[in-house]
Image: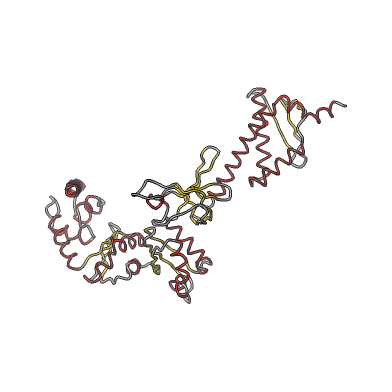
Amino acid sequence: MKADERNRSTGPNMGDLLRLVDTIHHEKNIEREVIFQGIEAALISAAKKRFGDEQLISVNIDRKTGHIDASHNGVALTPAEIAERIGAQTAKQVMIQKIREAECDHIYNEYYDQIGQIIVGTVHRVEFGGRKGKGDDAGRSPGLVIVKLPNVEAVLPAAEQIRGQTWRPGDRIRATVAEVKKQGTRVKVTLSRTRPVFITRLFEREIPEVADGVIEVKNVARKPGVRSKVAVECSDPRVDSVGACVGVGGNRIKNIVNELGGERIDIVVWSDDVEEMIRSSLSPAEVEEIILCDMLGRAIVLVTEENLSLAIGRGGQNVHLASKLCGLDIEIMTQEELQSQLDRTVAAFCTIPGVTPELADLLVGEGFTTYDDLSVIEPEDLMRMGGLTEEEVEEIVEEADRRSMEEERERKRQTEE
């Protein structure tokens, strides 16, 4: 037997190498080129462990034949020498590590690109939290849900679950990808069913006009499992945006509500006019007047006594969600409440050295109604409004801050009592 034949017979099997690459490609869904590069890197790493890090090692694999060309300091290594000098076990260990890293990168990139998108999986395991009394699962607080995806197990934390919904192994579950992190050679995928984007994606799936771009979901304000407000805008004046989202007999919105465990959804028409947007967001309550306080990003909304509780909503839900939807701090009052508060505020501001009645009137007219508001005013604005010096403004702001902190301490004391 000739020497080169002996070398081929004792060296790596090229057919086995190609079969290995194909197997990993199909099972792990990793590109062949990435696998070849991983094997080359593994052989180089293993060779450096054998010859030394300072040595010049070159390894190239023919992508079609699987033939390995390797050299050490410019001297070619035969297949037999590759197996003998590098060490098959060392090369195998490094190769496995490189392939795991490549698989990790592939999974990370796959799911990172899906952040904010809906993904469908199967509940694999449910880890319940602490007990809420006697009983079995029904008496335990929601815990971590392990969700099986095509090539990774994701986690749905309790904080990202809708209140009142329970899951069992084998259940089909939909959620958005919230976060993707690498942890060594593993990838941690965190899911969410509570974030506003989940509703946006459900609208895209259930409402063709949203999927086609005729209707756009402009903003979502949400209290998961309880109530959400969704602002939509339509590019086609012939289409009723709210009606299209609700569907015939409410079938479209019902599908979304069922997915969310009965969460109530209010659909409002988006408007670039701030006052009009506020009115729509507070629906079904009727608004009498809106006072915009641009300096504070606040809006004081006046309603009748009959509409007060409706505008605020149970537990403040309606006004809270409307504030988030509009991007403003909305405060609901009646005319009488506003006048009373303004009188008290003007009187209180006038007790601050340097604040005249005229300046106090200007401040409340801009929406500054508390010491805390005044403590965060821009010094330039206060200088302009009152014709004050920088030193005078600094004294006013410091005094307002001191009084605000005193009020906060008093509130805490009363709460503790």
23 vs 101, left or right, is: right
Q: Is residue 220 above or below residue 84?
A: below
Residue 4: x and y in percent read 84, 28
249 vs 58, left or right, is: left
Residue positioned most to the front: 135
Quarter of the image containing the N terminus? top right
Residue 364: x and y in percent read 20, 60
Residue name at image x 24 percent, y 68 percent: 308
In the foreground, 43 or 153: 153
Q: Is residue 334 above or below residue 405?
A: below
In the figure, residue 102 lies in which quadrant? Answer: top right
In the figure, residue 277 lies in which quadrant? Answer: bottom left
Q: How many marks?
A: 0
Residue positioned most to the bottom: 238
Residue 111: x and y in percent read 54, 49
Colour pattern:
secondary structure
